[in-house]
Amino acid sequence: MAEVTRREFLKFTGASLAGSSLVLLGFTPETALAEVRQFKLARATETRNTCPYCSVACGVLMYGTGDRAKNAKSAIFHIEGDPDHPVNRGTLCPKGASLIDFLHSDSRLQYPEYRAPRSAEWQRISWDEAFDKIAGLMKKDRDQNFVAKTADGLTVNRWLTTGMLAASASSNETGYITHKVMRSLGVLSFDNQARV
Amino acid sequence: MALQSLDIKQRSATTTSPPGVRAEATVELAKLIDTTKCIGCKACQTACMEWNDLRDEVGDCNGTYDNPRDLTAESWTVMRFAEYENPKGDLEWLIRKDGCMHCADPGCLKACPSPGAIVQYANGIVDFHEEHCIGCGYCIAGCPFDVPRISKKDNKAYKCTLCSDRVAVGLEPACVKTCPTGAITFGTKQQMQHDAAERVVDLKSRGFENAGLYDPAGVGGTHVMYVLHHADQPGLYNGLPERPHVSAMVRLWKGAAKPLALGGLLVAALAGWLNYVRVGPKEADADDERAAERAKERTDG
């Protein structure tokens, strides 16, 4: 190994100090290039949907990982306003603009739950069980309270003890079908979240 | 070295010039914030958090609607609410979306000692590159609007990027897109100035005779501009500076002091070299050696 004298050592350290001082003063050989953060939506799958919050029913675009290939399991990672939606034309309120955290929230309701009368416990049930339960309760109430004719013999076929509250985040077609189904049962009390 | 996805105009602590053969075809972009249309809903704040993957700590209430109370390394834009009683005795609620102004003459970039930590693109955006940031905080001293914040997590400076990643692919910033009242708009600086002028005429006809555009010349104009009802008193909007300018100390330190320091360095190096060639290295003679021996004996004994 080469011997380094005190003088040589001082020369080397002096030269390094001078070099680093020049770099700090801005004499850097680096080329003046820079890059922005990578655009995170480049090949993400874009899905249209309606904001679940209020009755304004703004259009949103949901961006999911993957390209819908069979083996790629999608996960939504970004949501922003849909510029082609006539209601909001791309804008969103503070709640809509932060929908991604609502979507991934631990407390988000993702399946039907049932709480029996006088019970404090919620239990998870299947969608089929939920539909059966709702249909059973509706039938029981309708059988008891359906009015086919009034006292003076006028045919009315109405069911006044149950009402329907529809959501605003529905298409015209959904609204039409909802209306037909409920009216055919005799339901007269009909309201919509869009009245708020 | 990273590839180039936007043309660079200026780069902190760098004397080599950026690639400059391209014609100035890149349009100068600007964000116009019309405080007279803002309802303070904070959609811009949540859209900013969402796009930039920022989740600040949940703060507390200090009796105002300001939430969070101030800009942080994880809150790059904050609505500032001010209650102003005008001379007629009416209360006016002045709401300003605070954040980086993207100055044409950025004090942060001027003050930054780390090469490439702050860049200005040809479209006017001033961007921080945290991988080059050394966390010294000079950008905070250099900023006339008190915008950059040092993160306690990684000791690096952060601020609004004007969504440079969205703008680079032709999109508008997240806050602009989400604004429900249309108080925030985005386009060429020329278009924004034109729109602002029209709005100012409208406001003047509605009794705001001091309405105007805030595009301060002290920092060469900004790429985030405000329409104010009271452009004669920007201080009403939670201390928006009336004549912002880059601090004289920063100008001196990064301007005149730099060539002087370089001169001093060269003079010292030259003097050392001249001394070496004319006088030669300092050699110890026999007397010096004996004196050193005696001094050693005294300290040892």
Image (cartoon, grey):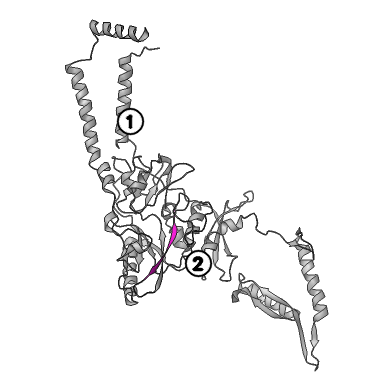
Q: Which mark is residue A20?
A: 1
Mark 1 or 2: in front is: 1
Q: What residue is drawn where x is 22% and y is 32%?
A: B264
Q: Is residue A46 visible?
A: no
Given contact means CB atoms under 8 Å apart, are the residues at marks 1 and 2 in contact? no
Give percent across and percent down for residue B268.
22, 27
* Residue B267 shown left or right of residue B106 in the figure: left
Q: Chain of mark 2?
A: A
Amino acid type, callout 2 = Asp
Q: Which residues are magenta?
A: B76-85
Bin the neighbour count of mark 2 within 10 Å (Cα to Cα): few under 14, some 14-19, many 20 and up: few
Task: Please identify the quarter of the rendering in which residue B123 is found.
Answer: bottom left
Q: Quadrant of the N terminus of chain A?
A: top left
Give percent across and percent down for residue B152.
47, 44
* Residue B135 shown left or right of residue B264 in the figure: right
Dot 1: what SS? Answer: helix
Q: Which mark is residue A84?
A: 2
The residue lying toward the viewer, choosing from B71 and A20, is B71
Q: Quadrant of the C terminus of chain A?
A: bottom right
The residue lying toward the viewer, choosing from B116 and A68, is B116
Give percent across and percent down for residue A64.
57, 54
* Residue B127 shown left or right of residue B74 in the figure: left
